Image: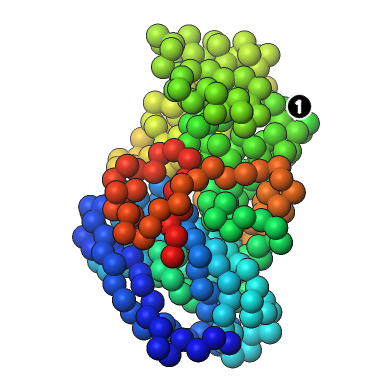
Amino acid sequence: MIDTSNTVNRVIQYAEPGTTKTQIAELPVEQPGPGQVLVRLSYSGVCHTDYGFCTLKFNNLPIPTPKGQIGGHEGVGQIIALGEGVETPAIGSKVGIKYAADACLSCSNCLEGGETSCSFVKVSGYLTPGTFQQYCLSAARYVTPIPDGLDLAGAAPLMCGGVTVYAALKRVALRNGDWVVVTGAGGGIGHLAIQYAKALGARVLALDAGPKKSFCIGLGADEFVDFMAHGSSEDLISTVKTLTGGGAKTVLMCSSSNKAYAQAIPMLGFRGSLCCLGVPEGENVPIEGAKVTALIDLELSIFAIKTGNRREAKEALELAARGLVKSHYQVRKMEDLTKVSSDTVSNPSDNLRF
């Protein structure tokens, strides 16, 4: 155990929720309580959900994000202290902290693997202090082991973005050769979705703006469609259906655009699935194009997922450790978070260095 009695914890707080303004504060390093571990964080990814929490863009939350909250939910580091009753993970273990900081693990949702929808879930960076800090307390049972050899900075975005797309692909029971359309394919989540889909044997059609083509193809996408180069939604949908031989098996909505959601259903083929990942900001808009007759005729499915559970997180990191998935990121200082958030973190992930 490392003595932290004379150490301060530098944290990033949301200074004025509703804006992107943040502030650096120095707080005492808390000691872990029963069942907890203290993690010395090295990096934290910055997710678009953090931007939503900070700027109060999500209308579905029960209460606004409180002023002074420490955001972040993609943290990686090393355990330096154990609370009472904790035997594993051991001190020195490299671990990650996810969107769900803890869950009851005994309710019906948890027992089905839906830990992020637990009635008692603690969400990192919302009402529970998150990973935009140097020292973070976490439930020992809920940290994720980081495989040996995996780049710590690169592991940070996997704790949410990578886990989320991997869990989505598992849920659709992806089969070898299935076509997966990834919207927002050149972004922070999308670029991981391309790689996880390829690692699981899919063919990938990347959908994004033209300048992202070389990046997406370089990640392994089989086809690329520039949505800005099509004069109408009908033309775009027709192109996607032609390239996928009649429609995709899965459309992963890594974009939060309402227009992109409206175009997604017609891109599906027989027994295709639309997976809702990107969270539209502001007013909730119904998904257009989902006529009941179309759903029935093609036996289509629509489902959503927040992010993965503990097992899916472990599996997602193991694929990355095998070299099948690699995060593309920029490392920035803590003081840069306001600028990073102002840019809405729309492209390959930023990581904060602590």
At 31% from the left and 76% from the top, the residue drawn is 26
Count of residue discs: 1
The image quarter containing residue 83 is: bottom right
Q: Which residue is mark 1?
A: 177
Q: Is residue 163 visible?
A: yes
Q: Is residue 277 above or below residue 163?
A: above
Q: Is residue 343 above or below residue 176?
A: below
Horizontal and vertical percent position of residue 233: 44, 14
**Residue at the limit of the structure toward the right, as seen here:** 176
323 with respect to 340 (left or right): right
| Callout 1 secondary element | loop
At 49% from the left and 26% from the top, the residue drawn is 212
Q: Compare residues 100 and 24 and report the one nearer the observer.
A: 24
Q: Is residue 304 visible?
A: no
At 57% from the left and 20% from the top, the residue drawn is 224
**Figure quadrant of the C terminus:** bottom left
Horizontal and vertical percent position of residue 193: 59, 38
Q: Compare residues 176 and 321 and report the one nearer the observer.
A: 321
At 41% from the left and 47% from the top, the residue drawn is 48
Horizontal and vertical percent position of residue 312: 67, 54
208 with respect to 197 (left or right): left
User: Label 1 sits on what residue type?
Assistant: Gly
Q: Is residue 279 above or below residue 216?
A: below
Mark 1 surroundings within 10 Å by alpha-carbon count, few (fewer than 14), some (14 through 19), many (20 or more): few
Q: Compare residues 3 and 252 and report the one nearer the observer.
A: 3
Horizontal and vertical percent position of residue 106: 62, 71
**Figure quadrant of the N terminus:** bottom right
Q: Compare residues 16 and 329 and report the one nearer the observer.
A: 329
The image's colour scheme reads rainbow
